[in-house]
Amino acid sequence: MKKSGMTVQTKEREREKRRRMALPVLFFFLAVSVLVSFWIGYYPLSPGEVVKAFLSRFGWEGSVSSQAVTIFWSIRLPRILSALLIGASLSVAGSVYQSMFRNPLVSPDILGVSSGASLGAAFAILNGASGWGIQASAFAGGILAVIASWLISRKSAHSQTLSLVLTGSMIMALCNSGVTMIKYISDPNDVLQQITFWLMGSLTKTNMEDVLWSMGPILLGLAVILAFRWRLNLLTLEDEEAQSLGIHVRHLRLVFIVASTLISAAAVCLGGLIGWVGLMIPHMARALVGADCRRLVPACGLLGAVYLLLMDDLARSVLSLEIPIGVVTSIMGAPFFVYLIIKRKDG
C-alpha cells in the first residue's frame, strides 16, 4: 500500500511538472509558427528577406527588394497578427464559457455574439458600407445580441445559467433568420457574393487598420479575463456553493460575459465567421495543463493563436486558390466534435 501511495505521488509530481512546462513550450511553438508564417505564401520569402524587410522599416539600408518589404509589412504582418488575435480571443472565450456554464460542448457563440455580428455585417454590406463600416456594424451586432440575451434571461424564473443558454439559442436563431432574409433580397451578382464570402471567414483582405481597430477591445477583454481568471474557478461550482464562499455570482458572471463578448465580437468583425476554434482548443489546452483556469486561460490563448495561424498557413498554401479559413477550421473541427460526443457518451 505504501509503494502504491508513493507511485501515485510520483505520477502526480510528474503530471504537475508537465503542466508547468506546457506554457513555455507553447510560447516556443508560437514564436516558431510566426517565423514560418512569414515565409509561406504565394510569394515565398526567404529567412534573410524576412529579416531585411523587417529592419528596413527602422532605417536599415541593405539590399532588399521593394516587393519583399511590401509583402512583409502590408500583407503578411497584418494577416499573422489577425490570426494570432482571433485564435487567442475565440479560444479564451470558449474556455470561459465552458467553465462558466460547466459544459464542455459550449462555444463562444452560446449567447449569439457570432450570429449577431453576422447580421450586423450582412446589413452593412446590403447598404453598401465600406470595410470600416462593415466592421463597426458587425461589432455592434455582436454586442447587442449578447445584451438582448442577458436582459431577457434576467426576466426568467429558471436558473440564470439555463436562462442564458435558452435565450442565447433564441437570439442566435433570430439573427440567423435575419441573415437569411438579407441574403434572399440581396443582388446575387454583387451583394450576395460579398455576404457569403464574409460568412465563410477569411483573412485575405485584412490590413493594419483593421488589426489596430480590433486590437483595442481584444487586448482589453483578454486583460480582464487574465486578471480575474482565478475567480473563474469559482464559477465552475454550483451557484449556491459559490455564494456560500461570499462570491456574488451574478456580478462575477457578468464581468466574464462582458469581457468574452468584447473579444469574440472584435474577433468576428476582424475575420468573419471562423468556427470550432473556441470549442476545440479549450479541450486540447485542458489536456495539457488541467482544468485550473489560472493555467487553462493563458494556455488557451497561446494554443489558439498557434492553431489558427497554422490553419491560415494551410488555407493559403495547400491549393493554388486560397481556401477560406472558416472552411478549413470546419473541416478540422467537425471530426473533433464527433469525437467529443462519442467520448462523452462512453464516459
Image (cartoon, helix red, strand yellow):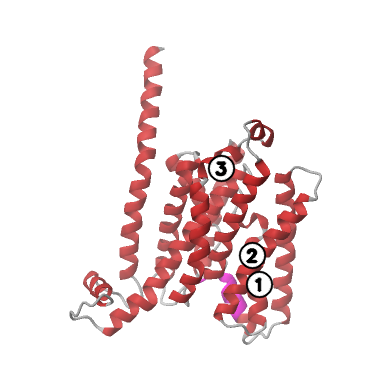
How many labels were placed on the picture?
Answer: 3
Label 3: which secondary element: helix
Instruction: Assign the C terminus to one quadrant of the image.
Output: top right
Horizontally, is 159 left or right of 2 in the view? Answer: right
Q: Which residue is mark 3?
A: 232
Does the magenta segment cover residue 196? yes
Distance from disc 3 to disc 1, alpha carbons, whole Å, reads 30 Å
The residue closer to the viewer here, 258 or 20, is 258
Q: Which amino acid, mark 1?
A: Gly
Q: Which span of residues is magenta-colored?
A: 194-202
For the point 67% across and 66% down, the residue is 116
Q: Name above or below for residue 238 compared with residue 182.
A: above
As drawn, the label of residue 86 is none
Q: Which amino acid, mark 3?
A: Leu
* Earlier sequence position, callout 1 versus callout 2: 1
As drawn, the label of residue 120 is 1
Do the residues under discs 1 and 2 have CB atoms within 8 angstroms?
A: yes
Q: Residue 274: percent from the left, percent from the top?
A: 54, 64
The residue closer to the viewer here, 289 or 250, is 250
Q: Residue 345: percent from the left, percent from the top?
A: 61, 39
Instruction: Judge depth for marks 3 and 1 and give the one in front.
Output: 3
